[in-house]
Amino acid sequence: MMTHFLSWQKPGYWYTFIIIETPLMKHILSIISAALLLTLHSAAQSPAPKEKIHFTSNSSLAILVGGSGEGANVQTINGIRYKKWSTGIGIGIDWYGIRSIPLVLDVRRFFTDKKNTGFVYGNAGINFAWDDGYYNGYTNGAVEVRYKKAFCGEAGVGYRMQLKNKSALVFSTGFSYKEMGVTQINYQGGVVPGYTKTTSSYEYYYRRIAVRVGLNF
């Protein structure tokens, strides 16, 4: 029978094991040694750890140009990125045509894993009116206007340019689309018994080119 001492140090601690060698212990140690060697061999040949999912935030300002003139849009998108893909929820303010608040789901596909890379993107969601509408009264009647939420979306291409810190400049251009529903109610003869009420509905479709610049974190 033989006695062995096994010691090693971790920061602030020393670990010492006393191993008493017997025939049974020799077999156990042989099995443990073989298992350790197999584990180390497998670890040496295993691929590098996969890239982790991390939080990403993108805030941008857009100039919108279309058949109804020019306008602006500000937007912030917050979500996650994994390898060449990112997705997030975006919200903003759109001043083109009837002012609205777009709420969208955004998806992006980067061309490479490099810090400076191009990408394609697309988003879609619901467009909410900035306010519910308005009511104007006059001598012999009144007009009531109500706005309705509708579809909105955007798709295009862009480029991400890494800055010295962890942020990046993002440039993109794409096709932007939004709808807005309007209901107009006309009251004739005043809002009293005997008045006449006429209801009209309108749908507005805004098609624009969006040129964006922003920051990504």
Image (cartoon, rainbow, N blue to C red):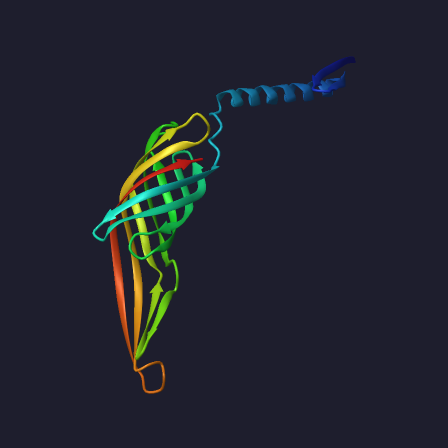
Q: Is residue 205 left or right of residue 213?
A: left
Percent of width and height locating residue 116: 36, 28
Give the residue drawn at x 35%, y 42%: 61
Is residue 111 something one can see in this rendering? Answer: no
Between 151 and 142, the one nearer to me in the picture: 142
Q: Residue furthest front?
A: 139
Give the residue drawn at x 29%, y 55%: 97
Give the residue drawn at x 31%, y 57%: 98
Q: In this view, does 156 lie to the left or right of 115?
A: left
Is residue 8 something one can see in this rendering? Answer: yes
Q: Residue furthest left?
A: 67
Between 70 and 86, the one nearer to me in the picture: 70
Percent of width and height locating residue 3: 78, 13
Percent of width and height locating residue 73: 34, 47
- Quarter of the image that includes the C terminus: top left
Between 69 and 106, the one nearer to me in the picture: 69
| Placement of 68 over or under 44, stated as above or below | below
| Placement of 48 over or under 131, stated as above or below | above
Q: How many marks?
A: 0
- Quarter of the image that includes the N terminus: top right
| Placement of 37 over or under 51, stated as above or below | above
Between 73 and 80, the one nearer to me in the picture: 73
Percent of width and height locating residue 20: 77, 17
| Placement of 91 over or under 36, stated as above or below | below
